[in-house]
Amino acid sequence: MVISGKELSAELKARMAAQVATFPKRYGRVPHLVVILVGEDPASQSYVKGKAKACEVVGIRNTTLLRPASITQEELLGMIDQLNRDEGVDGILVQLPLPEHIDENRIIAAIAREKDVDGFHPLNVAALWMKQPCTVACTPLGIIRMLDKAGVEIAGKRAVVIGRSQIVGLPTAKLLLDRNATVTICHSKTSNLAEITRQADILVVAIGRPRFVTEDMVSPGAVVIDVGVNRDPDTGKLCGDVDFEAIAPKAAVITPVPGGVGPMTITCLMENTISCFIARMTR
Ligand code: GUN
């Protein structure tokens, strides 16, 4: 079975649109998401466009602020400070990566925790690891939504996560652990990787290398979630971290690239924006 993140996203966005349509009457306005894009990285530009499009579909107000790569850290911190104080702003997202001269952790920590729709703020990260209410990062949340949609049982299963990034690998491992999976985190330095991945009932791959996971690394009947967004070195087309063609026939469930995890990340951003809005409106 191929889980279409695109279809699930459309379904979830339709549901959110109906919910947002009730907000003007109930709260006097709709949620407002501000996205800051620094520089002209084409991948970042494309992600930011996708976010604006999703806002339009769901009925969330979106402001995208474009700034040159030459912006100083102080200027960026000043913008964030102003948005933090703005009662009419519910979510603030600074598209990553930022130019070298800007300290990403400083920027992330400067965003008001209650407006941190990315779930990257240290207080949200800490709350996740302490099993406290928090905003969960969009990609990990999207992965869990896809597993649930496919009816995948997580409790008691062996989950292997390849990749240990702060924004995908680590929070995904924690969410799987919280659902009672037995979780192993692997990475670029792991020895005998294939031996470990072959034991996975659920394999999440977020390593950022085109077709890194080959057929011999996956057991028949496994659930394979591909977080990769790469350019195929031969064709230049978008491809995942998993050799989809070779693995799809033996996997019980697999996500495609494009049209898998990617759309779900954006959809979960909409969900987080709505949650931040409601929390602010009802506090
Ligand atoms: N760059 C790549 N993924 C993300 C994301 O989820 N959020 C932000 N802010 N930047 C990113």
Image: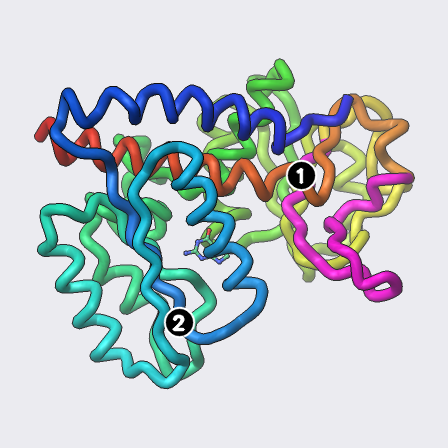
* Disc on res. 241: none
Check contact, mark 1 vs mark 2: CB within 8 A. Answer: no
The local secondary structure at tag 1 comes to: loop
Q: Looking at the image, can residue 145 be seen?
A: yes
In the rendered image, residue 236 lying in the magenta stretch gets the answer yes
The N terminus - image quarter: top right
Residue 202, picture quadrant: top right
> Residue drawn 35% across and 78% down?
102
Q: Is residue 220 left or right of residue 266?
A: right
In space, the residues marked 1 and 2 are separated at their CA atoms by: 26 Å
In the rendered image, residue 85 lying in the magenta stretch gets the answer no
Please state which amino acid type lies under the numbered disc 1: Gly
> Residue drawn 86% across and 26% down?
220
- Say which residue label 1 marks: 259
Foreground of the two, 161 or 230: 230
- Say which residue label 2 marks: 38
**CB of mark 1 near ligand 1 (< 8 Å):** no
Q: Is residue 283 left or right of residue 159?
A: left
Vertical arrangement, residue 260 with respect to residue 212, above or below: above
**Magenta residues, as a range?**
224-245
The C terminus - image quarter: top left
Foreground of the two, 147 or 180: 147
The local secondary structure at tag 2 comes to: strand
Foreground of the two, 225 or 129: 225
> Residue drawn 21% across and 25% down?
23
Q: Is residue 14 left or right of residue 117?
A: right
Vertical arrangement, residue 183 with respect to residue 16, above or below: below
Foreground of the two, 124 or 29: 29
Q: Measured from the top left, where is residue 47 in percent x and y?
A: 52, 55
Q: Measured from the top left, where is residue 21 in percent x and y?
A: 29, 23
